[in-house]
Image (cartoon, helix red, strand yellow):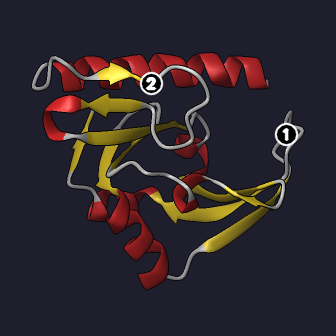
Amino acid sequence: MTFQTDLQYGKAAEKQVLLMIQKKYPKAHSVEGECKAYDIFVPEILSGIEVKSDRQAQITGNAFIEVKCNNSSSGICVTQAKIWVYCTEEKKYWLNTSDIVNMILSNETRIFHDRPAGETSTVLGHLIPLEKMEEYAMKVTP
């Protein structure tokens, strides 16, 4: 896996999530460019949605919630999205952002602080078992 293939996979996941959201909120749209706040904006509810995709989650059994990249705050620490959709190969976990923070604070999590294979950036984040993600999710979809 390379950054480019991961980016393509992530964009495909964002498109799938957007199509699901547009069934209820037709004005929802992707936010183009490098927007650290969120990936999708839903005008009908004035809310942003962050979409994360993770092909390794089914193999490792964990979701990765990033908090820093190259020693700068990132991920859950900088998002302005009210909702996160965490996409694995098999499921989409729909979570309130505040519930992700509570999940991290209320549970012992393993920390990952390294450079993932094929990447140039060093990241810091929490490894959350997928079962725990499901427990905190407001819904889980295929």
Q: In which quarter of the image is residue 46?
A: top left
Percent of width and height locating residue 53: 52, 35
Q: Is mark 1 on a helix, strand or loop?
A: loop
- The structure residue drawn at horizontal position 15% and vertical position 17%, both measured from the top left corner, is 26
Considering depth in this image, is 93 or 39 the residue closer to the camera? 39
Considering depth in this image, is 109 or 41 the residue closer to the camera? 41
Q: Is residue 35 left or right of residue 72?
A: left
Percent of width and height locating residue 84: 38, 47
Q: Is residue 121 left or right of residue 95?
A: right
Identify whether 80 is placed above or below 102.
Answer: above
Considering depth in this image, is 22 or 107 the residue closer to the camera? 22
Q: What distance separates the C-alpha of mark 1 from that of mark 2?
A: 28 Å
Residue type (three-letter) at the residue carrying disc 2: Val
Identify whether 8 is placed above or below 125.
Answer: above
**How many numbered marks appear?**
2
Q: Quadrant of residue 43?
A: top left
Any part of residue 94 in sight: yes
Residue type (three-letter) at the residue carrying disc 1: Ala
Q: In which quarter of the image is residue 47?
A: top left
Considering depth in this image, is 46 or 77 the residue closer to the camera? 46
Q: Circles 1 and 2: CB distance less than 8 Å? A: no
The circle drawn on residue 117 is 1
Q: Name the residue under label 2.
A: 31
Q: In which quarter of the image is the C terminus?
A: top left
Percent of width and height locating residue 15: 39, 17
Q: What element carries label 2?
A: loop
Percent of width and height locating residue 78: 56, 56
